[in-house]
Amino acid sequence: MSRFNLDSVIEDLDTTQIERQIPALEQSVEIVNSIAVKAVDALVKGPNRFLVAERLSRLGSIVIPHLEELIKESDELETKILAAIVLLQFDSMLGVPCLLDAIAHDQDYAGLAAEHLAKKGIKEAIEPIIDRLYAVALHSESLHKEVDLTVNLINALRKLDGDMPSKLCQHLTSPKTPWQIHKLLQQEMCTANNIER
């Protein structure tokens, strides 16, 4: 990127002289694009990728091609998941397979991925959500994390109007199940209409 004097660009944008205004507009686009590149680089480098990701959408759609390129080229799973979540906010579906995989396998972002897919009404998330709910260990040492994940997954399933299989309801409602899960399951999810699985 060329180095522009920002004050000069702003001054030229304010003018009514077309020969100054149009080049200033072109320079503005280049400046904003360069900022978008650096912001996406910040997502790659960390140290707190989540905090960067949740602010990237404020730059607008100019970040889309840079995030799409990142998803195609990155080997870092956390970076890809967070980029996919930001892209989904702009209705780009490129990262949906990555988010579906995160529901199935990721320890940190499964609930967040499910939540964002549900918000966009992506029905392909129903099956991985159900499968992950079967896999949660509500009696494990990391109970707090599992409860949070389970709550997120159940809420996402509800948002997608997914049916809770009766076997899954039984799996999730033992006497040792935390109260948060019991409460959620009492709210319409585990009914007589549930499908068998």
Image: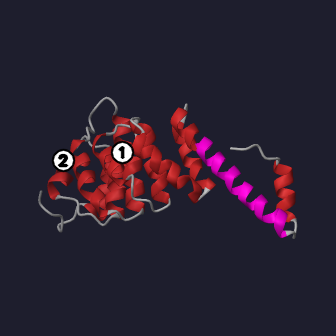
Q: Is residue 75 visible?
A: yes
Does 31 appear in magenta?
A: yes
Q: Is residue 81 visible?
A: no
Q: Residue furthest top?
A: 141
Can you give x and y, in whole percent of width and height, for residue 130 in the image?
24, 53
Mark 1–mark 2 Cα distance, whole angstroms, equals 19 Å
Which mark is on residue 4?
Answer: none
The kind of residue tagged 2 is: His
Instruction: Tell me if residue 89 comes above or below residue 145 in the rendering.
Output: below
Q: Quadrant of the C terminus?
A: bottom left
Asked whether 85 or 133 is in front, the reply is 85
Mark 1 neighbour class, 10 Å CA radius: few under 14, some 14 to 19, many 20 or more:
many
Using the rendered view, name the quadrant where residue 141 is placed.
top left
Query: Where does the magenta region start and end?
Result: 18-39
Can you give x and y, in whole percent of width and height, for residue 62 in the image?
58, 56
Q: Is residue 125 left or right of residue 111?
A: left
Residue that appears at 27% across and 45% down? 104
Asked whether 165 or 16 is in front, the reply is 16
Asked whether 89 or 22 is in front, the reply is 22
Residue that appears at 34% across and 35% down? 143
Instruction: Tell me if residue 145 comes above or below residue 112 in the rendering.
Output: above
Q: Residue furthest left?
A: 196
Which mark is on residue 110?
Answer: 1
Residue that appears at 30% across and 51% down? 182
Disc 2: which residue: 171
